[in-house]
Amino acid sequence: MTSSQRPARSGRKGRIAQRAAPPKIHPCPPGQIGGRYRPLSDSELHAIYQTALRLLAELGMGETPERLAGPLLEAGAINQNGRLLFSRDMVCSALAAAPKTFVLHGRDPARDIEVGGNRVFFGTGGAAVQTLDIDTGQYRPSTLADLRNFTRLQDKLTNVSWFTRCCIATDVPDNFELDTNTAYTLLRHTTKPTATAFTLAEHVSPIVRMLDIAAGGDGAFAQRPFMKAHISPVISPMRYAEDAVDVVFECLKHNIPVSCITAAQAGATAPATLAGFLAQSLAETLASLIMVQVLKPGHPMVFSNWPLVIDLRTGAFAGGGGEIAVLNAASAQLSNWLGLPSGVAASMTDAKALDAQYGAEKAMTSLAAALAGGNLIYESSGMTASLLGVSFEGFVLDDEMHAHTYRALRGVEVTPENLGFDAICDAVLGEGHFLGGAHTLSAMERDYFYPSLADRDSPKVWQDKGAPDAWSIARDKARLILDEHHPDYLSEDQDKAIRDILSLL
C-alpha cells in the first residue's frame, strides 16, 4: 500500500484528544477468569484431600452441639467418645448437594454477581477496631460513623463487588444494637451485595424483618436475599462452636446465604507445615459444608477456607508475606477443584502506613489469590495493620490495584486482528511508528487500563506538581467521594417502618 492509498488520518490535535479521552469500554471489569496459577499438582491435591477425609473419618469433630448432633447422626455420622466421625460418603453427599454456582444479589439487580467457577471478584471483610483517620493520619477506635462513611465510599468504587462490614463500631457496646445498626448502615448506603455477622442467633429474625421492609414486604427478602452472613461455625482445631452453629440454623431458616469461614492459624491452631495446614483447614471447612447440606440440602454456601499465618517468632498474626499468598492461592485451587464456590482472604497487609510494605504485601497476596481463581477475595480492600485497622485512602488505592489485577487475569487475546500483521507492515513502510494508527487506537480503547491515581509523569512534571505521593492523592479522592456521594437507598416510609420496630442510632 502506497502512502497515497493509505486512509487519511485525523490531524495531530484530533489524535491527542482521542488518546486523552477515557476508554469507552471498560477493559478489565470484575469477574475475570482466574485459575492459571496452580501451586498444587494433581497428586498434591489428592494427597491433601485424602488426608482431610482421614481426619474427618478417624478424628472427627468435637464439641458438637446437641441440636446439630442429632441431624448429623441421622445422616450417618458416628459418635466415638464424644466426637462425631464423618465417612467419605457423607463428604461426597455434601459435595453433591452443594450448589456449584449461585447469585449474590444486590438490592440493585444490576449489581448482582454470580459466584463459582473461576470467576474472580474482589470485595471486603474484616472487623477492624481501629480506623486510620483521614485527617490526622493516626489510628483511633472505629465508630459507627466510620462504617457509614466506608459504606458510602465503596458504593462508588467499581472494583469492590460486594461489601462486608469492614470495621466494628466500638462506640456501640451493646451487641444487639451493634448488629442491627451495622445491617441498617449497609442497607441504607449501598445497593451492592452485602454481608454482615450476627453475634447471637436471636439477632437474625429482627434484622430479617428490617430487610423484608426494604425488599417489599414479609418474606420478600428470602425470595431474593441481598445480604449474606459471615459465620465461623468451626473453631480450630476440629471442633464446632455452639453460638455460631445456632446462627447457622437461623440463617438457613431465613434463606440467608452463608459464608462459613475457617480461620485457623499456622503453627497455633493448625500445623506449621503448609501441607498439614491445608489438610486440617480443608477438613474443617468440609465439616461446615456437611453441616449446612445436612440441615438444608442445596443451600448456598461460600466455601471460605481461609488459611492464616502467625509470625512464629512472636505469635502475632501476619497478613502479608509469601506464605499467606501461596496458602490462600492453594486454598482457592482446592475449593475450585472440588467444584465449590470459593472464598479466600488476601490483601491483609501488616503495614500501618500506606507505604512500600503496604503496596508490596497487598499486590503479592491479592494477585496470587486471583490468579489461582479465588471466587470471592475477602479483606481485599482498605485493610491495614494485620486486620486491626482500615483506611479510607486504602479503599481508593486498592480499587485501582484490583483493576490492574483484573487486567492481568484477562490475559492476551491472540486473534488474527490482534496479531497485527497488516498494522506492522503499514507502520514499517509508512510513518515508522504506530502512534495514532487505527490499530493502535482500537487497542487503546479495548486493551489498556489507565490508572487515575498512579503517577506516570516525568520527574520534572511530578516535582512541579508538588511531588505528591500515593497516600495524599488517594486521600484527596476519598475526601471528594465522601463530600459528594450521600446515597440513601431507603424511602422515608421504609426508614420509618424500620425505626418503628428497631431502636437505631
Image (spheres, rainbow, N blue to C red):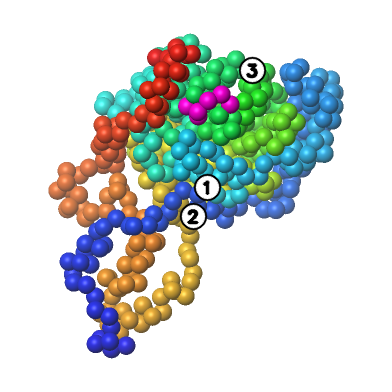
Q: Residue at x 33, y 35 (%)?
A: 393
Question: Can I make out residue 296 in this image?
Answer: yes
Residue 258 spot, x, y in % from top left: 61, 31
Amino acid on which disc 1 is placed: Val
Q: Which residue is mark 1?
A: 120
Specify the amino acid type for callout 3: Asp
**Residue under pointer 2:** 409
Viewer-closest of 217 and 25: 217
Determine contact: label 1, label 2, CB under 8 Å: yes
- The span shown in magenta is 214-219
Decide if residue 466 is on the left or right side of residue 196: left
> Between marks 3 and 1, how big is the CA–CA gap?
31 Å
Q: Secondary structure at mark 3?
A: helix
Q: Residue at x 28, y 87 (%)?
A: 5
Tell me the tag on residue 353: none
Above or below residue 32? Residue 58 is above
- Front-most of residues 191 and 316: 191
Task: Classify residue 65 by image quadrant.
Answer: top right
Task: Find residue 140 and report its horizontal and vertical position in percent.
Answer: 35, 20
Residue 100 in magenta stretch = no
Question: Disc 2 or 3, which lies upstream in sequence?
Answer: 3
